[in-house]
Image: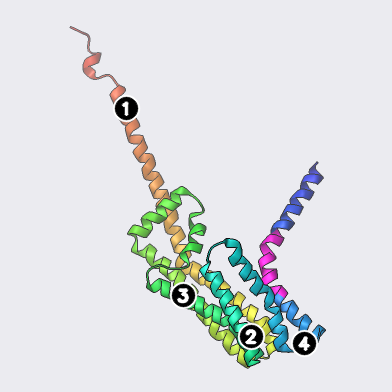
Amino acid sequence: MTNTGTTKGNSTDRRSVLRNFAPLLIDVAVPIGAYYLLKNGFGMSTLMALALSSVVPAVRTGWGVLKSREVNGMAALILFVNVVSLLLSFVAGDPRLMIAKDSAVSSTIGIGIIVSVVLGKPMMTAGMKPWVVKGEAGREAAWARLHAGSARFRRAERMFSLVWGVVLLAECVVRVVGAYTLPVDTMVWAGNVIMVVAMALGFVVGGALGAGPMAAMVVAEAKSAAGEGRRAGEVPEARALVRAEPAPADLAPAG
């Protein structure tokens, strides 16, 4: 029984790992592998290999839009940029444009995030808030109180989105420079390295300046509210005990 349980547990862990890494495999490994296979294995041109290797992420993005049964602004934007860039690359015949087209996605998203900060509705809050509140009602209420009454909390919220906007714009610049200065074969894999580094910077810097301080404030506020609630609950009990105690006059013998 123990071996069977262990085997099932290992099988579940493997499925979990595959499920977690599936997007990385589909979005990164498949396009890169397809590019080198088509170019070096089948002798296709660089442009044709790049175009065909972009089909999988484009189809994946389009399927995500259809599956959600609603207009997902981010997914629709990425799909639009992929399709237009693919068509432009065929017209221009420039494989470097195919590589640089990913920067259009980063720059557009980055600009959108920065604009949302300026408008007072930071776009990255939707993705960061579940990580902070962790589905706890106390933290959810603490978030609402801090968002309504703490300027420091709102400043950290804006900073988190601002960091991501700047990081994505910087990634755009680096990717474009690399696309037109490095060999195409190098940029096929280096572009993904640039993306991973940018994501890491976004998480580390955004966490240090935004999400981290916000999480600490939410935890402190939730604990404070819980402590006040306990103290408030103790007062009625104490009063009930006082009322239950007999008065000194009641203890004196009747005379």
Q: Considering the numbered disc 1 on the image, is that residue within a helix, a strand or a loop?
A: helix
Q: Nearer the viewer, mark 3 or mark 1?
A: 3
Residue 146, horizontal then vertical, whole percent: 37, 57
**Residue to which mark 3 is pinned:** 112
**Residue to which mark 1 is pinned:** 240
**Whole-number angstrom distance, CA of label 3 to CA of label 2:** 22 Å
Question: Do callouts 4 and 3 mark residues in contact (Cβ within 8 Å)?
Answer: no
Residue shown at 39% from the left, 44% from the top = 227
Task: Tell me if residue 2 comes above or below residue 90 in the rendering.
Answer: above
Q: Give amino acid for label 3.
A: Gly
Q: Which mark is residue 41?
A: none
Question: Do callouts 2 and 1 mark residues in contact (Cβ within 8 Å)?
Answer: no
Left or right, 115 with reference to 63: left
Point out the tag, 4 or 2, that comes first from the N-terminus. Answer: 4
**Whole-number angstrom distance, CA of label 3 to CA of label 1:** 58 Å
Q: Nearer the viewer, mark 4 or mark 3?
A: 4
The image quarter in which residue 246 lies:
top left
Question: Do callouts 1 and 4 mark residues in contact (Cβ within 8 Å)?
Answer: no
Q: Which mark is residue 98?
A: 2
**Whole-number angstrom distance, CA of label 2 to CA of label 1:** 76 Å
**Whole-number angstrom distance, CA of label 1 to CA of label 4:** 86 Å
Where are the magenta residues, as a range? Answer: 17-30
Task: Tell me if residue 87 comes above or below residue 138 in the rendering.
Answer: below
Is residue 172 visible in the rendered image? The answer is: yes
Point out the tag, 2 or 1, that comes first from the N-terminus. Answer: 2
* Label 2 Cα neighbours within 10 Å, binned few <14 / some 14-19 / many ≥20: many
Residue shown at 55% from the left, 78% from the top = 105
Left or right, 189 with reference to 133: right
